[in-house]
Amino acid sequence: MATKSEASLNLDLDLLHRLKSTEPPVWLAPRAELSETARKASKIIFSYLRTYAPKSPLDQLLIEGFDAEQIWQQIDLQSQPLLSSLKREVKKFEKKPEEIGKIREVLEGEKKVVESVGKVLEGERRVLAEESDDFDEDLDDGLDDDDEEEEEEEGSEGEEEKKGKGGAEGGIEDEFLKINELQEYLEEDEAREYGLKKDSNDSRKKGGRRVLDNEEDEDEDEEDEDEEELGVFGDSDDNEEEDEHRQKLENAGYEDFFGSKRKKAPKKNLKSIEELEEDSGLDDEEDEDEAVETKKNDNLSTHEKQSEQLRAEIEKMEKANLDPKTWTMQGEVTAAQRPKNSALEVDLDFQHNVRPAPVITEEFTASLEEMIKKRIIEGQFDDVEKAASLPSKAPRELKELDENKSKKGLAEVYEEEYVQKTNPAAAPLTFSDEQKKEASMLFKKLCLKLDALSHFHFTPKPVIEDMSIQANVPALAMEEIAPVAVSDAAMLAPEEVFAGRGDVKEEAELTKAERKRRRATEATKRMTAKKARDNTLLNDNDGDYLIFS
Amino acid sequence: MQSSMDVETVPSQLQNESGSLPPKPLFEPLKAHEMSDGRVQFRKVNVPPHRYSPLKKIWMEIYTPIYEQMKIDIRMNLKARRVELKTRADTPDISNLQKCADFVHAFMLGFDVIDAIALLRLDELYIESFEIKDVKTLRGEHLSRAIGRLSGKGGKTKFAIENATKTRIVIADSKIHILGSFANIKIARDSLCSLILGSPAGKVYSKLRAVTARLAERF
């Protein structure tokens, strides 16, 4: 047998090694040889487990001609009763821990075999874990094992079922997070609420799992999961441990999640029990009393349980009533009486007596601009108009200061003043009067023009001829604005333009004789003028004094 | 009692004897040359050098009214640079001489003949002269600036004062001469003094306007 087992073992190992050695990308595509190897390996493992599952109907795993689903079903057939038996074993060990030591001897013989297989499986599992990361999404919902396996198979055809499953788990689950655990806990909690559940199984199972995990990880993993499944709906006889378990969950520590640093299998159970005892010591007195009471009593009826819950609630409420109220419930509270910044957290309600600032939106500005435009078009501005003051007295005539040298002599000025005083009628017109006259003249002209435009029968005023200055401008320019032809005909006669003798020669053009003649004429003119002046002087003065010259 | 009676009786006595008293003497006004015991009166007016050539140019205009209308003899003493005036036998009024002397003096100060003629024609015209240093001690540039302020740009400030107050003003370096009636001289003098002291022309104008308006309203 040993040789046979060794030979077969070598063969199996060979198969498994082959599987392990294949590159991960190879697994992506379905291959016949890989599928074949995988099937054979599963058959081998099945036959190993056959020894532990005497009740299974199948002697060996039938792989020829069967598809993946059928193979899985076969495995299930074997493993279901196996899991239940294992559970029973674990319970037994929980009650009698000393028997574990016995197993160890038995196990150690087979340990090597199983360990080697386990290690190989571990390696393969890691390989598969890399591949099956894609499939992890489906597992997040905490599906049952069957579903997981089915989805696994759908995703990868012909892959190893077990390994696929193991790989899938390895993707997101590790020692801490087990989705099946989570699901089981949730169901457990729900059941507890309604008082249907007994958790003793779970606690034992957890202890058992810890034992198994430390030694053989993946081999028993699926079995554990099956156990869990069974455990959810299975019957658990122990009611004592229900509250203890609850307490343990409430006071979970590091060790509960990650296990103690010193991984000792047999002492786990002991430890768990010790923890329970410690937890019970740490809990509140009420809980402790409750736990003690419930431990002491038998099964509580549903009514009692409900009444206990009610009592707990009532006590809680009474306690709240006795305590001083929160600051929001007290009447007037100053800042010193409430914790710092607590007003920020509370939704205070108070009146704002201020009109909220208008929200400047586009419509708002558009409406404003429209109003502005309308007002501008209408010309209706809200300017403050000055109230016109009533004229109290006639406006004084402002005398304008003349800054030019006065053309009249001082004597004439006084003469005018005197005349105005004595005889106002005969007084000559003042400057202001002249301005008035000019203004009236302008107005008359304007009226004439307007009459010409507006009357049907218009008779022009008679023309009064007076002297006018003729400008020496071509005639056509005076008559037409746009001269058709330019005419040089001037308004003035030639003698009017230039009246003089023939000597129009310049200084430079003169001959010497002519220059002399000019000088002589000028000299005679000067002499005559002087003589005329001197004559008058001579006549008036005495001869004694010098005469100006 | 008796004395009063006596007094009362005396006038009655006089009244009875009114024909015995001589008539009141009637004297005719003295002629110009009869005053001061029939001697001729002279007036001499110095001619400053800067007025010498203008005097030469304008001599006839001065000479004619004085000789013809005021009946005063006038001559120019070239050696002494003086204008001399003398009453004639037919000078109607002794004040003519003084008037003529004032007229010539006005010309020497710098006034135009047409303005100075007013002295001959009107009695109540006077000349007032004062210096800038009488108002405020100014030196150098300040003095120049004050003179500039007085006359204004192109003389417009001076003319404005002249026209508003019916006076004539002559600004000769630091000396200021004003010719006009008494009240007008006062107004003109006030304006000029405020200008010397530094007020701007606009302010002076506004004051002038107010004062002249008031003056005009009075008549």
Image (tube, coloured by chain):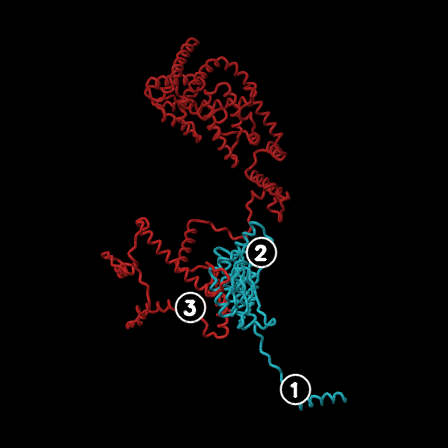
Chain colours: A red, B cyan
Residue A31 horizontal/vertical position (percent)? 33, 19
Please report the residue visible at 41 percent of the width from the left and 61 percent of the height from the top. Answer: A531
Q: CA distance from mark 3 to mark 1?
A: 69 Å
- Answer above or below: position of A238 versus B70: above
Query: Left or right of A40: which side holds A192?
Result: right
Q: Residues within 10 Å of mark 2 (few under 14, many from 20)?
A: many
Q: Secondary structure at mark 1?
A: loop
Quarter that holds the C terminus of chain A: bottom left
Query: Is the residue at mark 2 from the same chain as the one at mark 1?
Result: yes
- Separation of marks 2 and 1 at Cα, in angstroms: 64 Å
Q: Which residue is mark 1?
A: B21
Q: Which residue is mark 3?
A: A436
Q: Position of residue A8 (x, y in %)?
A: 40, 12
Q: Chain of mark 2?
A: B
Question: What amino acid is labelled 3 in the image?
Answer: Lys
Protein chain holding label 1: B
Q: Which of the two discs, 3 and 1, sits closer to the camera?
A: 1
Q: Residue at x 44, y 9 (%)?
A: A2
Residue at the outermost left position:
A485
Tally of numbered discs:
3
